[in-house]
Amino acid sequence: MKIYRIINRYYLIINKIRAAHYPSFESIKEHLADHDIEISLRTLQRDLQNIRNEFGIEIIYNKLENGYAIDKDETGDYQYFMRFFEMTVMSGTLTETLRNNPNIGDFISFDLAEPTSGVEHISKILFAIKDNFKVKIEYKRFQDDTAFETNIAPGLIKEYKKRWYLIAWNLDLEEFRTYGLERIVSLELGSENFDKKLIKDCKELFTHVIGISSPTEEPELVELSFDAYQGKYIKTLPLHESQTVLVDDENEYRILIKVVPNFELIQLILSHREKVEVIKPKWLRQEIKEICKKIVNK
């Protein structure tokens, strides 16, 4: 459990620094003490060095402000690491709690859906992305359960609805494709490199995508109006990172998101039932209307 405690400490330090305005060492120390963690200045300095070296999150000390801050210019997007920290901390907390209190499991309800397979490929895929190696996979079609081989340039691993997917440039078809990791029968690293620009293109392509459908259209501005009560949920769990608030009062919570209008977006809108209204674009409003008509007819 040692690694869990270290990651938990990193997580608390980063969270304190990003939430506060240049917190001092004493402020960080008090924050950790609230979680039963004692820390010295030397330990903090060592932790900041490890966070920089292992996760690429640059935390600097500002003498004028007498406190610490994340250097966003040097760090880039660190949200993925924060998600990793959250998952690790949650896993460690549950494991430690269940180990010390075996019967407490009676009071925890897990989603016991069949666990996804294919995660054993993640390590190789990440290695291929990091060093831009071409990959050959044997992939089983979802439609007819037949397998085929194809050559890819892996660009992005994405989690969606408890399943893992690989977004890659298919070198044979010359287009981006999405592959479910659980349907990859075998994976073989090649010896040839691919153009690293494909990784950047892949990430940019899926910046505006909800879900895993390969985008064939350009992103659009989608305006959605929720009733005030449903809006409370949308505040705490945004639909997309581009979400901006247009109206927030006792009657309405209206947002604007910039996304590719794909199958998953329509699923998401329909999941909110009568509590949401599509304001624009008009064609999407009409499509939702037609889907609702078909539902009624069934």
Image (cartoon, rainbow, N blue to C red):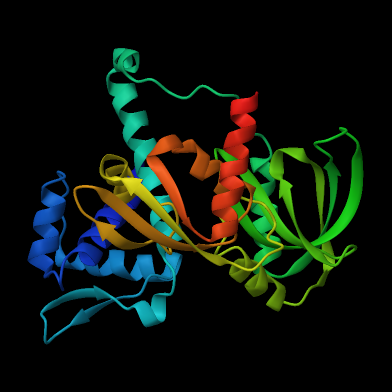
Locate residue 98: give its quadrant.
top left
In the drawing, does residue 191 fall left or right of residue 249? right
Give x and y (percent) for residue 240. 45, 57
Give x and y (percent) for residue 16. 20, 60
**Viewer can see residue 115:** no
- Which residue: 59% across, 52% down? 158
Camera-side residue of 192 and 238: 238
Give x and y (percent) for residue 86. 37, 47
Give x and y (percent) for residue 270. 51, 39
Camera-side residue of 118 and 257: 257
In the drawing, does residue 46 fall left or right of residue 177? left
- Which residue: 14% across, 85% down? 63
- Which residue: 41% across, 65% down? 78
Locate residue 96: give its quadrant.
top left
Camera-side residue of 183 and 233: 233
**Viewer can see residue 266:** yes
Quadrant occupied by the C terminus: top right
Quadrant occupied by the N terminus: top left
Seen in the picture, residue 34 relative to 221 is either above or below; the reply is above
In the drawing, does residue 189 fall left or right of residue 217? right
Q: How many marks?
A: 0
In the drawing, does residue 187 fall left or right of residue 111? right
Seen in the picture, residue 91 relative to 251 is either above or below; the reply is above
- Which residue: 25% across, 66% down? 18
For the view shown, which residue lies furthest in the bottom direction? 64
